[in-house]
Image (spheres, rainbow, N blue to C red):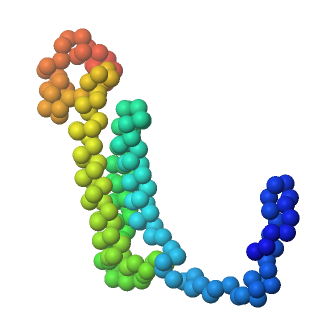
Amino acid sequence: MTTASTTNGRPVTSASADEKKRPAPERDLDAPEYYLNRELTWLSFVKRVLHEAHDTRTPLLERVKFLAITGSILDEFFMKRIGGLKQQVAAGVHKLTVDGRSPIQQIEESHELIRPLNIEQQGLRPTRLFPRTTGSGCATTTSRTSSRWLRRRRWTPPIRSRSCRTCH
């Protein structure tokens, strides 16, 4: 390219004679490497959301929300996406997607990406988020203490009377 002049501080270029003669390279637009897989890109989105839960600059409750969002997205992913792929496998569908993957390949590659995400998600809960709640005014309990509190016979009379008014 040759620079002819400038307009508004930007160079205006024109193609040289050699560049005009060269044809554009042929590209096979049906080639799978030009396309992204729908399931795998969805999992990369989940990974980015989980990364937000790791970010210590983000407020604690926002981080907890990001962690909950990843759990919700992965639940939906298994119910809808993996479920649909398993139905295709059961029906004997062998048609490749535009990115060149069969349903069984998509399931296997999804599982390869999900395993580290699950490990990362599970490791984030107790070790990184909940110790920070002690000085933040939030209280965390184990399921054992929560279930003890939820038993009606352990409620004090004021709690029992409030719950009776609101629940019945």
Report the residue at 22% width, 38% height from top: 126
Q: Give 33 or 107, whichever is nearer the viewer.
A: 33
Tell which of 5 and 37 is nearer to you. Answer: 5
* Position of the C terminus by quadrant: top left
Q: Is residue 47 left or right of residue 28?
A: left
What number of labels is visible? 0
Between 110 and 4, the residue placed more toward the observer is 4
Note whether 148 is above or below 121 in the view shown.
Answer: above
- Looking at this view, name the residue that lies furthest to the top: 158
Please name the residue shown 38% across and 48% down the image.
Answer: 51
Residue 94 position, x and y percent, is 37, 83
Vertically, is 39 above or below 90? above
> Which quarter of the picture shows residue 55?
top left
Q: Is residue 131 left or right of residue 20?
A: left
Q: Position of residue 86 (x, y in %)?
A: 32, 71
Whether residue 168 is visible to the viewer of this picture, yes or no, is no
Q: Residue at x 33, y 48 (%)?
A: 71
Image quarter hosting the N terminus: bottom right
- Picture coordinates of residue 41, whole percent (x, y): 44, 63
Which quadrant holds residue 81? bottom left
Q: Is residue 21 above or below residue 40?
A: below
Query: In the image, what residue occupies the spot 13% across and 20% down?
Result: 153
Asked if one can make out residue 30 in the rendered structure from this viewpoint, the answer is: yes
**Residue 2 place in picture, x, y as percent:** 79, 73
- Above/below status of 36 relative to 64: below
